[in-house]
Amino acid sequence: MQPVAGGPEQVTVATYDNEVAEKLGGHGVALKLIRADGSRRAAPVGVTVDVAGFAGAYGGNFESRLRLIAKPACALTTPASAACTRSIPVPSKTNLVDHKLTATLPAAQHGMVYVVAAAANGEAGSYTAT
């Protein structure tokens, strides 16, 4: 995590393995940011995920297509519930030189779970049908 102006003093990061990430529609890792400084307001936190393990995975410029998606936290406990299935793309950037996926995410008391997932298009090309 990187400090961000206006960010919280303390954050607890819960991480989930590939099995959970796949159930949430992603790959490799999922995470949840929980504000731990006593405030109930959401505040920004800079997050970096090492995606070097995906550099040669799957083909179709897979690493370049990685991004973060946000899902309601209830997706961890009741993934079949209609209220828990929506996915929202999160502005994020993958640096293909140092293999890092970065984003500024809100930390809150309750909130979202963030999942590394692949988009159809990326900086290095597209995996859509032609």
Image (spheres, rainbow, N blue to C red):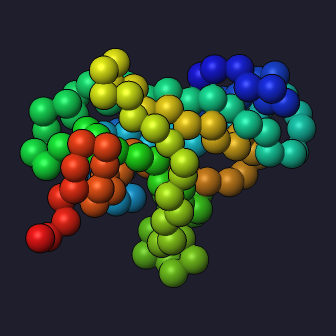
Image vertical order of residue 9 relative to residue 23, above or below: above
Residue at left 56%, top 30%? 47
Which x, y percent locates residue 118? 31, 52
Residue 107 seen in the current view: yes
Give the residue drawn at x 31%, y 43%.
123
Whether 74 is drawn above or below 66: the answer is below
Q: Nearer the viewer, residue 116 or 111?
A: 116
Residue at x-position 30% and y-position 20%: 97
Q: Is residue 118 above or below residue 46?
A: below
Quadrant of the rendered structure where residue 30 is? Answer: top left
* Left or right placement of residue 49 versus residue 61 in this view: right
Front position in the image: 62 or 29: 62
Q: Is residue 8 visible?
A: no
State which quadrant residue 10 falls in: top right
Q: Position of residue 68 (x, y in %)?
A: 46, 47
- Quarter of the image that includes the C terminus: bottom left
Give percent across and percent down for residue 104: 63, 37
Q: Position of residue 23 (x, y in %)?
A: 33, 59
41 vs 55, left or right, is right
Total numbered badges shown on the rendered structure: 0
